[in-house]
Amino acid sequence: MVGCGSAATGHVYGMAASGQFDIVALAEPSPESLERFRARLPLLGDVPAFSSADEMFQAVDLDAVTVVTPHTLHHPIVMSAIKRGLHVLCEKPLTCEVAHAKEIAEAAEAAGVVVMVRYQRRFDPAYRFMREKIASGELGELRTIAVTCGQRWQRGTAGTWRQDPALSGGGMLMDSGSHLADMLLWLVDRPVESVSALVDQCGSPVDINTSATVRFAGGVHGQLTVIGDLAITWMETVVVSGSDGLLRYEVDPQHPWRTGRVTFSRDNQIVEPLRLQRGPSEHEAWADAIRGEGPNLSPPSAGVRVAELTAAIYRSAREGQTVRLDTDADVALSA
């Protein structure tokens, strides 16, 4: 494991639940973070720790690595792992620059290793239900999609690396909002043609609130709204409209990290599935892909698409104009 901050705890639990991994080394430059990590997870107390990923790579025989570091550090660590033939599970976003995301995708394919981006909602049964309804044609011709997420992010991340552009690469959109940007792209599953956006930093060095209108191939209209100064802990809604039906998704504010409530309306009937089909967790899917027993359900190409959309949003807001992705080849050299 590279990075032993709070997010790494979830990786440990996920890998333990899958029963398919042994954690044999840790890399963490902060002695304080490492000490807190071992205190939370005493079973890892005897696992050797190193001050850098490269030091760990040279000292320990590994099959795979998780990367749970500040965003701008992902690219060099992932590339170093790929060059050593290691499989990678990388926290979102894959990278903060499109060129870096493309480099990782090409290197992973050339090396024959599995690089998965940790976009958990791809494994969430409610989101999988929505994607299946769209892909099956039951919603009819896709018309519009609106995705909104909000978090008490500005207050909760004040004074941390997440509001330091050198480490975070951006604000709420680059961080928690990245998950919902991925869902917008994953559910529609069409190329983005143009983006028009507004960004408000709310006095922070990074973006806090973002509103983006996205036009997809075929005329589908999308709306992505990211609220970083929300008054409550979390909110998340998705509304997908088709010629024959409507999908709605919303989380319970009291239990924001659980699967939300999804409904499917068609022919004047509303269906709320009671038994959503559970798929593999991201760690189970990663292990399956490494063994060749399943596809990579969150591949580097997902990271490339999110990086392209994110960069287009930042550029549109900065320049005050619509950005066309089909003609602006240099839209996303950086965020």
Image: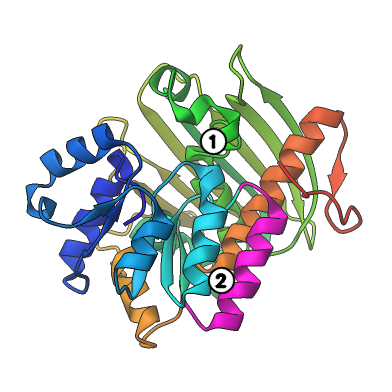
The residue at the point 48 percent across, 50 percent down is 92
Q: Residues within 10 Å of mark 2 (few under 14, many from 20)?
A: some
Is 24 left or right of 206, judged from the image as shown?
A: left
The residue mark sitting in front, 1 or 2, is 1
Q: Residues within 10 Å of mark 1 (few under 14, many from 20)?
A: some
Q: Is residue 125 above or below residue 145?
A: below
Secondary element type, mark 2: helix
Task: Residue under label 2, please give it.
Answer: 135
Is 56 left or right of 335, judged from the image as shown?
A: left
The tag earlier along the polypeptide, 1 or 2, is 2
The residue at the point 28 percent across, 45 percent down is 258
Examine the residues drawn in magenta and state their main secondary structure: helix
- Res. 231 image quadrant: top left
Residue 65 visible at all = no
Residue at the bottom extreme of this rendering: 292
How far across and down, in percent of the image, does residue 276 sit? 29, 63
Q: Is residue 333 above or below residue 207?
A: below
Question: Residue 51 or 147: which is nearer the viewer?
Answer: 51
Is 171 left or right of 92, judged from the image as shown?
A: right
How far across and down, in percent of the image, does residue 239 sit? 54, 45
> Quarter holding the N terminus?
bottom left
Magenta span: 96-113
How far is the residue under mark 1 from the one under mark 2? Answer: 37 Å
Secondary element type, mark 1: helix
> Quarter holding the C terminus?
top right
- Res. 12 image quadrant: bottom left
Task: Residue under label 1, please give it.
Answer: 167
Decide whether residue 334 is among the magenta residues: no
